[in-house]
Amino acid sequence: MRIDIHDQQDPPLPGENGITILPGYQTDISLSEIITSRLPKPFEDECISYNSMQSQSMCLGVCLQNYNYAKCGCVEPLFPEIEHRKLCNITKVSDVCCLDSVLVDLTQGADCNCPLPCLSTHFSKQISMAVWPSQKSFFKGNQNASFEDLKLYRASHAKVRIYYKTFERKIFDQKPMFHPSELFSYLGGECALWLGLSLTAFFELVELLLPRKYHNL
């Protein structure tokens, strides 16, 4: 079993981002929330705002499947499916090799055009696991049980604890170095400075030339 801890605005992707939960173990997952706010064009990240039915991960998954189908004639069964397209057989060597070659192509420069989201929330996770339940706790609640019962119970049950490590959020917020009004103000100041210097140089030149003219007369 896999679980995915994600923001409410993002679709769950347990196959890609999920955490595997094993029977017979208690899995503790502590979370720290991280929020990132980016700037759209013309700034460097050129982020976009995805809607609630899509995310950058889903965009990349669909892009990958399109490349898979174009090159291999089938799509990866473990990624988002595309209607009316044949699934690759991952037990077939030729299909697996073809899918691997698509990944190589993507890492070497093929473009998926899936920009970063302008606002994203993700969770930093710390995971720890321990055998569960312990013999002491199991037999305390099941006094007539046997070790075989404990074995069967561990094989079919799991325990998960999810909690915030801290209630503080880390927020990374991009800001433009200059707002438009400030930019025009700085440009105006620079233009005025250079115009002033140009006029000063012009009058100095006139001042140098005039005495020579009068002297020649």
Image (cartoon, grey):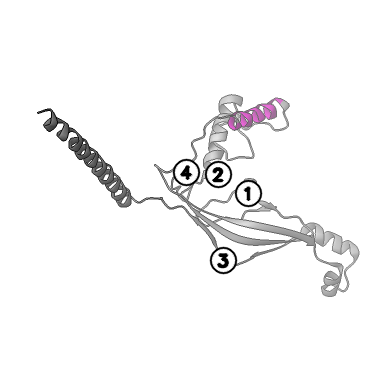
User: In this rendering, which labeled residue sits more in front, label 1 or label 4?
Assistant: 4
Secondary structure, mark 3, is loop
Q: Residues within 10 Å of mark 4 (few under 14, many from 20)?
A: some
Q: Are marks 2 and 1 in contact (CB under 8 Å)?
A: yes
In the displayed structure, does residue 111 sit left or right of residue 212?
right
Q: Is residue 83 visible?
A: no
Give the mark, 4 or 3, whose residue is nearer the N terminus: 4
Q: Disc 4 to disc 3, how far (Cα)?
A: 26 Å
Up/down of 130 relative to 93, above or below? below
Decide which of tag 2 and tag 4 comes sooner along the chain.
4
Asked if labels 4 and 1 touch by Cβ distance under 8 angstroms, the answer is: no
* In magenta segment, residue 101: yes
- Give how far apart the Cα atoms at labels 3 and 1 are: 23 Å
Task: Find disc 2 in the rendering and name its residue.
Answer: 57
Overall secondary structure of the magenta section: helix
In the picture of the structure, the residue carrying the numbered disc 3 is: 168
Label 2 with label 4: CB-CB less than 8 Å: no
For marks 1 and 4 on the same chain, the one whose residue lies earlier in the sequence: 1
- Whether the magenta-drawn stretch holds residue 53 is answered as no
Q: Classify mark 2: residues with Cα within 10 Å, few (<14), some (14-19) or many (20+).
A: some
Secondary structure beneath dot 1 equals helix
Amino acid tagged 3: Glu
Label 3 or label 2, whichever lies nearer to me, is 3
* Percent coordinates x, y for residue 24 in the rendering: 79, 59
Q: Residue furthest left?
A: 217
- Location of the C terminus by quadrant is top left
* Residue positioned 72% across, 28% down in the render: 92
The stretch of residues the image draws in magenta is 94-107
